[in-house]
Structure formats: C-alpha cells, structure tokens
Amino acid sequence: MYSAISPLEFRYLNFPEAESLRKYFSEEGFIYHLALVESKLVATYAHYEHCSSQIATQVHEAVDKITVEDVYAEEKRIHHQLRAVVNCMAKHVSQDAKPWIHLGATSHDIVCTTDAYRFKQCSQLVLQPVLLELQAILISIAEREKNTVQVGRTHGQHAVPITFGFAVAEYVSRLGTRIVKLQEATDNLCGQFSGAVGAYNAQSLLVENPIEFEKTFLGKLGLSPATHSTQIVEPEFMLDYLHACTSTLGVLANLSDDMRHLQRTEIGEVMEEVSQKQVGSSTMPHKRNPIHFEHVKSLWKTFMPRMTTGYMDQISEHQRDLTNSASARFYGEIATALYLAARRLKRVFKGLIVDKEALQRNLQMAQDKIIAEPLYIMLAKQGHPDAHEAVRRCFIESDAIDDLNLSEEQKQIINNPQQYIGVAIQKTQQVCDYWRQKLHKK
C-alpha cells in the first residue's frame, strides 16, 4: 500500500469501504469487468442459439479464473491487453468454447461497453447513495437552523440578514440539481457491439439482425446501445458523466470553502467537530483547523482540471485513434474524488457545531449598517425623489435617521434588523420539501 505512487491509494483510500471503489476502478476490477462483458457476449450467442448454453456457462465460469498477473504476463508477450484477456479466458474453456470468446468484436466494443457498465454500476451503487445521504444531512441542518438569524454576506462584507438554514438551503438546491444531472448522465451511459468501424461488418456475417443482437447483448448488462458509433462509443456520453461528477465536486468545494471561512477566528459561526486528540499545528498547540473542509477544496483543485483532458479526449480521428489510451484510464479517479469528498462532508456535517452566540454577535456588529437597505426601500416606496442618496448621506455624513419621515411600524424594522429576513424561513422550507420529495421519487 505505502509503496504506491498515487496518494489516492496510500492516503485517501486507506479504509475498508474503499473496496467498493476498487471493485470498479482498480486494474483488477477493470480486467474482471472486461472478462464479464466478454462472457455476456457469448451468452448472447447462446441466447440466439448460435452456440450451446454449456459453452456460455464455461465462458462465464472462466471470468473468475483469470488473474491480473496472468493477463499482464500475456500482455507482455503479445502487447495487447484486451487480446490478453481473451487468451487467458480461452485457457479455462474447452476447444468448442474457445472460438466464441470475442467473436465478431473489436477491442472497444468490449472496452467502451465495460467502461459504461462499471461506471454506471459504481455510480448507482456507491456514488449516488453517499451523495443522497449527504443531501439528507444538509436538509436536516437547513430545517433545524431555518430560524437562526445570520448576517448575509456579499463580496465578503456584511449585507442584510438571512438565516443560517437559508444559507445551507442554497447548497441543498445546488447539490440536488447536480445529483439529478449525475443520475441522468449515469442512465445515458451506453455500450456498443458494432465492429471495427461501427458499421456491423463482421456482425453481419455472424447474425441475421446485428442491431437487434447488439441490443440484446447490452441489455444483459443493463445498458442501451449508442445511437451511432464508429469503433468507439460517442464520447459525449462519458464526457457528460465526467462533467456531472466534476460540477458536483465543485458544489461540495464551494460549500466547504464557505464553511471554512465561517470558522475564521474573527467570524467563528460554525466549527467542525474535532477529536480532543487532534493536533492543529506542529508549533501552536491551541489551533483547531478546518482540515476537512480544506481537504475537500484541495480534492477539487486536484481533479477539476482533469476535465480538460476529458474534453481533449472528445476528439478522435476518423473511426478511432489511441490518443486517449492512457488518459481515459484515469477517469475513475474523478468519480473517486467525488466519493471521497461526499463521504468526508457527510461525516463532518453530522457533527457540525453552529455557534448561535457568534451569529448574533456578528449580526449586531453590523446592525447600524444593514438597516440601510430597508430604509432606502421604505423611503422610495413613500415617493422620496432620491431615497438611495438620502440614506447614503445618513451613513456617510452621519445625518440623523430621525429626520426621515418614518412610521412606527417602519421604525420597528429599523430598530430590530434581525426581523429583516424577508421570506428566508419559508424559502428554506420550500427548498427542503422540494428536494426531499424529488430525490425520494428517484
């Protein structure tokens, strides 16, 4: 483990649940799924009675018999990974079964289909569940804190009051939207069995209806065929999936950055729940750093630029080239980073500490300033010809607010700015109700 080059392995995937990711994105997982897809192809031939069910069973059983070591040894000999998988599978079946493995397929019929299958499975079984769990926690915080008044901030400065629940509801909405996009992109991942240039040349020699055969083959994997393909599946399906992962990670990074700043000493409105044994600094024993929020932002900084590579992989000359042969192997790390970020934030937000005294203190700090907007609006509504300028002078030139013609009801708002929260409470609940219902239906 500690001899690995990637920090993902020795530092960030060093926990038991990480096996759920390795199952799909490790090299062992990749080769297993290549073999699995090959077995489904033979099962499809058996479905149409081109070969016997016994042959399909032999090939299926061979999936668990091949090893990464065997495949890599064979690849070293022939310099082709997919053919090495086929050769290793062939060693574990009868002479009658051998011709059916990979029959009619080009390499990327298997590779593209394998990628669609394993990314779809991982997204549905591993990634989306942890995002939904995080979303549920954020909804509970937003509802719990929907009445907790907080000074709103724009451009890093105090603006007008909101509630802390309202601030969290922004991320409930943004994350909800991304989860839906990720689900859609996952559902759209597709495979192919269309041959060397995508025109079903070889398949036309083997089966009566190659398009129907392709549909049946992919259906055994829970996939649909691409509308059109060359030697590879249209790259936009995987690109949309990677974009959904990356933009979701961006929402989590933005949420983390906001929470990190709210933990600043001079703000102190929230705090990560930390172990009493945690060391915040090698030289300053008093420190308690927002390490988890910082970590999520750092993950985003690492993996967000990978999307540039994804966009470059969108370009492939004619039927196919090999300019993505290395870069596409790293796609799983983008989904892995999103999982790691969501998992960490789920744990942090479960124990998030909201300091209501600090929230009130910061609100009072700006109390004399944040009444400027309601004051301006009230005056303009009364027909004041230049209400904005009048209020500006009150604060810049220290003119007396008492000189302005305000009703007692209006003065109550001015004297109690914590009441000036608009419909923050109602809006928070509306957002929470909407996303709880929408994602529950999913």
Image (cartoon, grey):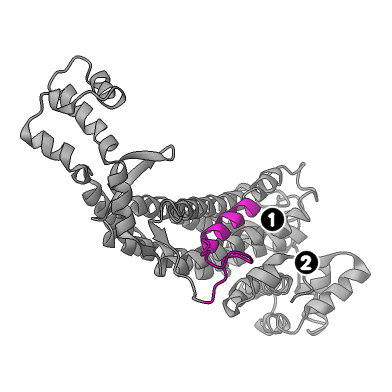
- The residue furthest right is 77
Any magenta on residue 1? no
Q: Identify whether 218 is placed above or below 419.
A: below
- For residue 66, the mark is none
Residue 37: percent from the left, percent from the top?
A: 67, 70
For disc 2, the marked residue is 5
Q: Earlier in the sequence, mark 2 or mark 1?
A: 2
Residue 206: percent from the left, percent from the top?
A: 73, 63
Q: Amino acid at mark 2?
A: Ile
Q: Residues within 10 Å of mark 1 (few under 14, many from 20)?
A: many
Residue 251: percent from the left, percent from the top?
A: 48, 51
Q: Residues within 10 Å of mark 2 (few under 14, many from 20)?
A: few
For disc 1, the marked residue is 194
Q: Are marks 2 and 1 in contact (CB under 8 Å)?
A: no
Q: Quadrant location of the C terminus?
A: bottom left
Q: Amino acid at mark 1?
A: Ser
Residue shown at the point (84%, 79%) measured from the top left: 70
Residue 218: percent from the left, percent from the top?
A: 60, 64
Left or right relative to 319: residue 348: left
Q: Identify whether 420 is placed above or below 392.
A: below
- Where disc 2 sits, the SS reads loop
Residue shown at the point (6%, 34%) measured from the top left: 408
Any magenta on residue 287? yes
Q: Mark 2 or mark 1, which is nearer to you?
A: 2
Magenta stretch bounds? 277-303
Residue shown at the point (67%, 70%) measured from the top left: 11
> Looking at this view, is 125 or 9 the one in front?
9
Q: Identify whether 94 is placed above or below 395.
A: below
